[in-house]
Image (spheres, rainbow, N blue to C red):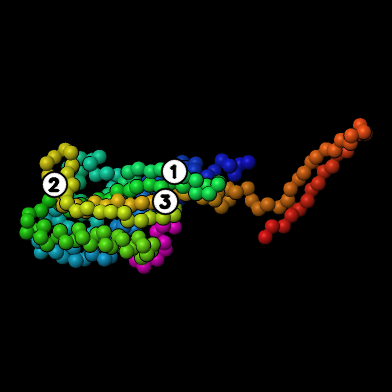
Amino acid sequence: MTEQSVFQHGGCVYPLSASTAASSLHDADPALYYSLAYFTSVLQTYMGARLAAEATLAGLSGPNAITQAVQYVLPYEPKLVSQEQQAGKWPLLAVWRESGKYRWRTVARMETQATWRIAYMLPPMTGGQLERLQPFLNSVPKILLNRIEQRFDPGYASGESFMKLAGLDEVDMLEDAWGSYQFPQGNIVFPAWLGKLFVVERDEDNPAGFDGGALTGIDVDYQLKPSDGSPVVDHLIDQSITTT
């Protein structure tokens, strides 16, 4: 029964490795890890160069300079850290788990149906700067929507499915909003796009090497006791089987 001591839900295999060679996000929440990496990659591919060029023309420099589509990523809600920690790290992309529920996918497998939140934030700007850069907040969800539906991008992981890497069964864009984001620690507002995702992860087969091996046969040991009280007859069957 040793195979029952290992299990997998989504892309995460338990028990977690004691090794710290990979980040805890990679090992304990690969769904978020690979989703953040994929979103960062496609945003840079499809709008990064133009965004950086417009930011230069708008005069954004110093801690508010923008040189790529995503400069800093967070796997949690930005308000959980102080405003000062984000200075000089724009644009900021955050994806975090908000809520979830569970249901039986089949008679033997459970699945997680979760709501994730996304925030894409630009630095504080003047009106003239915002006029140049605010339109990119419209492009962010359009890029993510298309590439999520596509499930892969030629420029990411040699075209491999990000959902396969992340162990995700389903990802859907649900809704979005435009406006601003404000940290609780201050009164500065940041131009932002805010979105919501529906994400499904499910119980998976045990990882390779932890399934007890191929079924090669069944040993059956049973006893027959005649009604006339004669001695018990022991039978042992050792039957090899072939499965297809």
Q: Which image quarter is the C terminus in? A: bottom right
* Nearest the eye: 219 or 198: 198
Alpha-carbon neighbours of circle 3 within 10 Å: few (<14), some, or many (≥20)? Answer: many
Toward the front, the furthest residue is: 227
Q: Is residue 118 left or right of residue 100?
A: left
State yes or no: discs 2 and 1 in contact (Cβ < 8 Å). Answer: no
Q: Which one is closest to the eye, mark 2 or mark 1?
A: 1
Locate residue 192, reporting x and y percent: 19, 52
Looking at the rendering, the stretch of residues picked out in magenta corresponds to 154-164
Give, as a three-letter code, the residue at label 3.
Val
Q: Which image quarter is the N terminus in? A: top right
Mark 3, secondary structure of its residue: strand
Label for residue 102? 1
Give, as a three-letter code, the residue at label 2.
Val
User: Is the residue 88 above or below the residue 56 in the image?
Assistant: above
Question: How many numbered marks, from 0 up?
Answer: 3
C-alpha distance separating marks 3 and 1: 10 Å
Q: Residue at x 14, y 60 (%)?
A: 133
Residue at the disc numbered 2: 189
Residue at the disc numbered 3: 200
**N-term-proximal mark, 2 vs 1:** 1
Quadrant of res 100: top left
Q: Which one is closest to the eye, mark 2 or mark 3?
A: 3
* Nearest the eye: 193 or 103: 103
